[in-house]
Amino acid sequence: MRQIVLDTETTGLEPAEGHRIIEIGCVELVDRRLTRNNFHQYLQPDREIDQGAVEVHGITNEFLRDKPRFADIAEDFVSYIRGAELIIHNAPFDVGFLNHELIQRLKDAEPIADLCLVTDTLTMARSLHPGQRNSLDALCKRYDVDNSQRDLHGALLDAEILADVYLAMTGGQTSLSLGASSAPGAGAVREVVRRLPAKRPPLTVVHAVEDELVEHRARLAAIDKASGGQCLWLSPGADNG
């Protein structure tokens, strides 16, 4: 199972108004394990970044001046995500921008929904925690995920944090617990080692009665007949009761 946790940063809020993606950050999970096969790219948008957006992510036009354009990395990006499940917080926002970029910049572009399955962790969180705040920061606090480095938004950092949150929300603990405290997500199963006492009473042995033995032999005979004489329990040396 290959999953890509994805986030973007943009010049503004509406692709229909000409706003563009300026950062893509992706973190790969295979069988719910981080692979470090990440995809991260800053992009030259060929337009000014809204001041409000700069205050959110801190990315400036000067910083992006020598970065590639979306068209330069589009094919590599599509190859990276194709066939995976995309995990995105508030997916309509990011998918809307990605579709706009792909259609505008890549010949014969396929929409994201044709390339990948998309899972929206915001929708998932609202279902799990109705009536509560479900921003990424709120979920970090709820699931005890460290986001202390998140002074500003950043696509790769946010994707890494969201990966931890997603694993916690979907039952993140998969290792054996030896009694250490943890904060498992909804539906998580905690496995705890329990040692049996050194001295314990002998186990009670219940023997089959004759009627049960007769039914058992009849069942073995039926199996042997149906299998053409291949019933293992009737082979020489087998304990068939």
Image (spheres, helix red, strand yellow):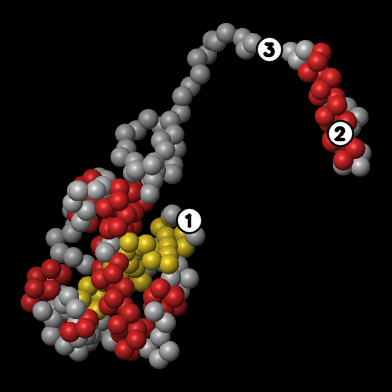
**Which residue carries the number 3 mark?**
205
Give the image quarter of residue 61: bottom left
Side of 57 where 200 appears, left or right: right
Side of 70 where 110 appears, left or right: right
Give the image quarter of residue 90: bottom left
Could you tell me which secondary element the residue under label 3 belongs to?
Answer: loop
C-alpha span from label 2 to label 3: 28 Å
Side of 93 where 236 appears, left or right: right
Which of 92/49 is in front? 92
Give the crowd class for mark 2: few <14, some 14-19, many >=20 residues within 10 Å.
Answer: few
Q: Nearer the viewer, mark 2 or mark 1?
A: 2
Q: Amino acid at mark 1?
A: Asp
Residue 197 image position (x, y, % from top left) = 50, 14
Image quarter (top left, top right, bottom left or bottom right) of the C terminus: top right
Which circle's residue, 2 or 1, is located before the other in the chain?
1
Give the crowd class for mark 3: few <14, some 14-19, many >=20 residues within 10 Å.
Answer: few
Residue at the image position 9 percent from the left and 70 percent from the top: 55
Q: In the figure, 130 relative to 179: above or below?
A: below
Q: Amino acid at mark 2?
A: Ala
Which circle's residue, 2 or 3, is located before the other in the chain?
3
Give the image quarter of residue 155: bottom left
